Image (tube, helix red, strand yellow):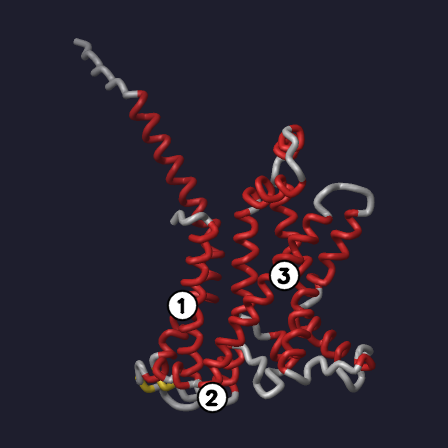
C-alpha cells in the first residue's frame, strides 16, 4: 500500500518578498554602521571624551601635580570676577562684528567679480584663493615681519602698526582679510555657480536691472551659502587665537587679548586648569546658542 505524500504548504509570495526585503535592509544597515564606525570612533576619542573631561575639570580644583578636588561651582563663580576675561569678551565681540562685516562684503565682491567664465578669470580665482593655502601661523609671522617697525619693509611709512591698540586691531584685521577672503570667496562662488542660468535669463528677458537681479534673485538663492559662511566666520572670530598670540601677543597693554588667549594664559601660565576649563565650557555654551540663533534667523524663523 503506497502512502500519499503530504502536500507542501504554499508560501505566500508577499511574505517571502517582505522577509527578503527586511534581510536586505538589515544588511545595508549593518554595512552602513561598519563604514561609519571608524569616523564615530574618531569623534568619540577626539571630541566626546575630551569634552566630558573638560566639563569634569571645570567642576574641580585641578592642580598640575596632585589629585583634583571637587569645588563646584567655584570655578564658574570666578568667571565673572576675572576683569581680563570680561575685557576680552568685549574685545572679541568687537573684533567679530568688524571682521564678519568686512570679510563677508569682500568675499562677496570677489565672488561676483569672478562668477562669470571669461578669459583670465581662472587666474584671478587662483590668485584670490592662494593666501588661503598659507598656514595661519605662517601668515601671522609673515605680517609681523612685514609690519615690524624695526626691520619690516613697511616700517619706513612711519606707522606704528602694532604699537597702539587701534593700529594693532587694524593690522590684525588686514591679516585676517588677506588670509580668509579667498576661502570665503570660494564658498560663495560655489553657491553662485549652483544658481541656474535660466533664472537669470528669464529675469533679463523681463527687463530686470542688475540691482534687481542681485537683490531679488542672487541674494535669496544664496542665503544657505551665506549662512554657512557667516557661521564659519563668526565661530572662527570668537575662537580667535593665532593672530593675536603670534602677531600682537595680546598687546599693547592687553588691548588685543581674545577670550581663547585668556583661557590659554589661565591654563599654561597660572596653571589654573579648572578655571580655564570653566571658561572653555562657558565659551562652548555661548557658541552653541549663538549658532542655533544664527540658523534660526537665517532660515527665516523656521526651526
Mark 1 or mark 2: name the one nearer the start of the chain. Answer: 2
Residue 191: x and y in percent read 60, 45
Q: Which residue is mark 2?
A: 271
Q: Secondary structure at mark 2?
A: loop
Distance CA(mark 3)–CA(mark 1): 25 Å
Q: Name the spot of residue 102 as percent of width and height, x first.
A: 63, 62
When asked about the image quadrant of residue 176, the answer is bottom right
Which mark is drawn over residue 103? 3
Q: Secondary structure at mark 3?
A: helix
Q: State whether residue 43 is above or below residue 218.
A: below
Residue marked by disc 1: 285
Q: Nearer the viewer, mark 3 or mark 1?
A: 3
Point 52% across, 84% down: residue: 265
* Residue neighbourhood size for the residue with mark 3, other residues' Cα within 10 Å, grouped as few (<14), some (14–19), many (≥20): many
- Asked if residue 211 is positioned above or below residue 292 in the image, the reply reads above
**Separation of disc 3 and disc 2 at Cα?**
36 Å
Q: Secondary structure at mark 1?
A: helix
Q: Earlier in the sequence, mark 3 or mark 1?
A: 3
Please report the residue visible at 32 percent of the width from the left and 86 percent of the height from the top.
Answer: 69
Circle 1 or circle 2, nearest the eye: 1
Quadrant hosting residue 149: bottom right
Q: Is residue 149 above or below residue 30?
A: below
| Residue at the left extreme of this rendering | 1
- Identify the residue shown where x is 77% and y is 56%: 127
Quadrant for the N terminus in the image: top left
Q: Residue 277: percent from the left, percent from the top?
A: 42, 78
Question: Foreground: 52 or 189?
Answer: 189
The answer to whether residue 281 is left or right of residue 107 is left
Amino acid at each position: 500500500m503506497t502512502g500519499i505524500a503530504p502536500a507542501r504548504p504554499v508560501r505566500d509570495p508577499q511574505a517571502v518578498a517582505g522577509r527578503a526585503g527586511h534581510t536586505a535592509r538589515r544588511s545595508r544597515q549593518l554595512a552602513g554602521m561598519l563604514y561609519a564606525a571608524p569616523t564615530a570612533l574618531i569623534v568619540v576619542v577626539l571630541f566626546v571624551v575630551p569634552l566630558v573631561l573638560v566639563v569634569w575639570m571645570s567642576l574641580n580644583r585641578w592642580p598640575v601635580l596632585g589629585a583634583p578636588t571637587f569645588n563646584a561651582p567655584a570655578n564658574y563663580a570666578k568667571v565673572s570676577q576675572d576683569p581680563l576675561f570680561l575685557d576680552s569678551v568685549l574685545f572679541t565681540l568687537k573684533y567679530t562684528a568688524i571682521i564678519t562685516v568686512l570679510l563677508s562684503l569682500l568675499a562677496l565682491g570677489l565672488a561676483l567679480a569672478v562668477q562669470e567664465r571669461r578669459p583670465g578669470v581662472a587666474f584671478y580665482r587662483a590668485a584670490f584663493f592662494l593666501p588661503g593655502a598659507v598656514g595661519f601661523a605662517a601668515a601671522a609671522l609673515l605680517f609681523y615681519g612685514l609690519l615690524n617697525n624695526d626691520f619690516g619693509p613697511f616700517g619706513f611709512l612711519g606707522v606704528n602698526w602694532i604699537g597702539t591698540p587701534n593700529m594693532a586691531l587694524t593690522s590684525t584685521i588686514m591679516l585676517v582679510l588677506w588670509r580668509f577672503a579667498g576661502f570665503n570667496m570660494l564658498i560663495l562662488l560655489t553657491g553662485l555657480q549652483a544658481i541656474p542660468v535660466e533664472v537669470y535669463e528669464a529675469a533679463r528677458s523681463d527687463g530686470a536691472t542688475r540691482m534687481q537681479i542681485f537683490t531679488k534673485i542672487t541674494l535669496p538663492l544664496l542665503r544657505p551659502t551665506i549662512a554657512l559662511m557667516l557661521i564659519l566666520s563668526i565661530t572662527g572670530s570668537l575662537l580667535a587665537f593665532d593672530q593675536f598670540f603670534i602677531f600682537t601677543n595680546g598687546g599693547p597693554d592687553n588691548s588685543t587679548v581674545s577670550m581663547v588667549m585668556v583661557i590659554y594664559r589661565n591654563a599654561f601660565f597660572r596653571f589654573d586648569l579648572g578655571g580655564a576649563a570653566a571658561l572653555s565650557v562657558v565659551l562652548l555654551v555661548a557658541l552653541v546658542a549663538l549658532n542655533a540663533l544664527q540658523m534660526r534667523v537665517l532660515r527665516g524663523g523656521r526651526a
